[in-house]
Image (cartoon, helix red, strand yellow):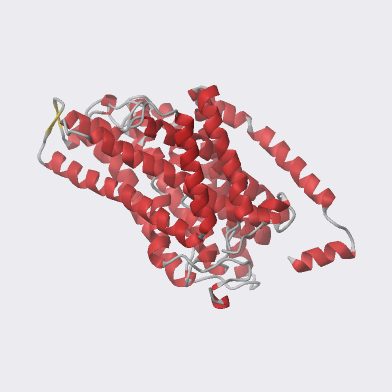
């Protein structure tokens, strides 16, 4: 590996254009769509289309804000470094640890999901074994090289994108042909012909926003990958724009098509809505095919979590804001300390698979949503600060910018505040997550004070800052 391929932070520029674009696309397609959309359709009906569209619009502005920041300064550690630069050291600390909480909670649920999906094919094999094997393989892949991570995530994304494209093409054909699906005729009229847009009421539709926001989680992964990407100034705008267009097609298009194929009350929270449709068609082996796709989505999520938190924790450790071990990097230029730290957290998913009821995983997902929203808020606030500094002539603003700023920035922040606020009135898991906010805030405050107390003072502190 030549020195020209290694940046100042010790990372390699090993991710290719092909890998970055598929990482960006794959990050926006997860279990939230493949599995979670069924339960939300059953609860809210066709209004879920509107929820996905609104959250997709917010995701679009978040991605454009991220793009502007990345083009300002591509760096591994991404928004944590931007929070430090544009808000302050405490903001970087808070953003980094909230992001880790997001992925820790998500990983606990996802690694258990992997075990459940594998159990369908290997019912006699204890679920904790398959969960452990999957975790060991993913940790090993991330420890070996960033290029190997990129290749694995590329193929995970190919599987997910292919599944969505096949569904969209097949579904459109079924609607055009007015096919019979389990005794129901596929038609555009199915969308609004069973109680209108809000069959369960506007309030129920509002309550779906938190879960839909979680479905869009990991779109920021492309920004974290910027520091290990060749020619980020050329690749990143295309990758981000590609995510935006595909969000509209894959998410909003899929949910809209589902409501055309079957009336909304045919879906349930116990199986993938895609399985519901194909099972009603009587297509053999659809259960195994969709099980493989959902398994891929769960593995992809765990893989992405290990990759991103490894970089975020190293960024925190370099400032003395995370355990020193998490800042360690191996000879392959992989931050193995942070990856192992997160891997241990994921290991709890294997243990909890036996001792914690389903509600605990719902709570984990709801708490993870807080991390998603805090990440999005951080990116928008940093973009606003970048714009302000650029207008003052302190920095040069990139040509790739947030459209409609600052109005779109403030609008996105208001929408995210609504998402958090409605959690106080939603289900049990969401309420528990909402009331965990003061607990998380207190823990972050105590952690920051602890970090500050351990920092050297006087000349020694000046030397530390200079070294950073």
Q: How many labels does the image show?
A: 0
Q: In this view, does 301 lie to the left or right of 38?
A: right
Q: Which of 136 and 158 is in front in this view?
A: 136
The residue lying at 63 percent from left, 60 percent from top is 329
Q: Which residue is most to the front?
A: 124
Quick check: can you spot residue 216?
A: no
Coordinates of residue 190 in the picture (x, y in percent): 20, 32
Q: Nearer the viewer, residue 426 or 195?
A: 426
Q: Is residue 317 left or right of residue 192?
A: right
Q: Which of 239 and 135 is in front in this view?
A: 135
Q: Which of 11 and 179 is in front in this view?
A: 11
Q: Is residue 124 above or below residue 373?
A: above
Coordinates of residue 53 in the picture (x, y in percent): 37, 44
Q: In this view, does 151 lie above or below 363?
A: below
Quick check: can you spot residue 229?
A: yes
Q: Is residue 157 above or below residue 288?
A: below
Q: Is residue 259 above or below residue 172?
A: above
Coordinates of residue 18 in the picture (x, y in percent): 37, 64
The residue lying at 54 percent from left, 47 percent from top is 413
Residue 154, picture quadrant:
bottom left
Coordinates of residue 284 in the picture (x, y in percent): 18, 33
């Amino acid at each position: 590996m030549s020195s020209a391929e290694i940046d100042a932070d010790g990372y390699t520029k090993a991710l290719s254009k092909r890998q970055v674009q598929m990482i960006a696309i794959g990050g926006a397609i997860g279990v939230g769509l493949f599995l979670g959309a069924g339960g939300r359709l059953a609860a809210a009906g066709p209004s879920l289309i509107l929820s996905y569209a609104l959250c997709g619009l917010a995701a679009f502005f978040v991605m454009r804000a991220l793009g502007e920041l990345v083009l300002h300064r591509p760096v591994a550690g991404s928004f944590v470094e931007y929070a430090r630069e544009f808000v302050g050291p405490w903001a970087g600390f808070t953003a980094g640890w909230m992001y880790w909480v997001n992925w820790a909670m998500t990983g606990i649920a996802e690694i258990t999901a992997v075990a459940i999906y594998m159990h369908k094919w290997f019912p006699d094999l204890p679920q904790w074994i398959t969960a452990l094997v999957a975790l060991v393989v993913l940790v090993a892949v991330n420890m070996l090289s960033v290029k190997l991570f990129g290749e694995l995530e590329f193929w995970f994304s190919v599987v997910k994108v292919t599944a969505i494209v096949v569904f969209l093409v097949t579904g459109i054909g079924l609607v055009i042909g007015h096919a019979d699906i389990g005794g129901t005729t596929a038609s555009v009229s199915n969308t609004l012909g069973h109680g209108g847009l809000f069959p369960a009421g506007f309030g129920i539709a509002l309550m779906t926003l938190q879960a839909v926001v979680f479905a869009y989680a990991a779109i920021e992964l492309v920004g974290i990958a910027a520091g290990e990407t060749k020619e980020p100034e050329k690749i990143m705008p295309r990758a981000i724009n590609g995510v935006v267009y595909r969000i509209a097609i894959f998410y909003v298009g899929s949910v809209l098509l589902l409501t055309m194929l079957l009336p909304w009350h045919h879906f349930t929270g116990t199986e993938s809505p895609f399985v519901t449709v194909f099972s009603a068609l009587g297509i053999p082996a659809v259960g195994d095919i969709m099980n493989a796709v959902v398994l891929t989505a769960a593995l992809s999520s765990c893989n992405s979590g290990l990759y991103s938190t490894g970089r975020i924790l190293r960024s925190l450790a370099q400032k003395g804001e995370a355990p020193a071990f998490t800042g360690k990097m191996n000879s392959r230029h992989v931050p193995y300390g942070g990856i192992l730290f997160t891997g241990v957290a994921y290991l709890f998913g294997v243990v909890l698979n036996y001792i914690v009821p389903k509600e605990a995983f719902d709570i984990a997902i709801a708490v993870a949503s807080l991390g998603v929203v805090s990440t999005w808020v951080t990116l928008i606030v940093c973009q606003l600060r970048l714009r302000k500094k650029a207008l003052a002539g302190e920095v040069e603003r990139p040509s790739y910018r947030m459209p409609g700023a600052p109005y779109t920035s403030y609008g996105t922040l208001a929408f995210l505040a609504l998402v958090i606020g409605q959690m106080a009135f939603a289900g049990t898991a969401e309420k528990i997550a909402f009331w965990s906010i003061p607990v998380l805030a207190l823990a972050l405050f105590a952690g920051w004070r602890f970090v500050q107390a351990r920092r050297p003072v006087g000349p020694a502190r000046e030397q530390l800052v200079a070294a950073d």
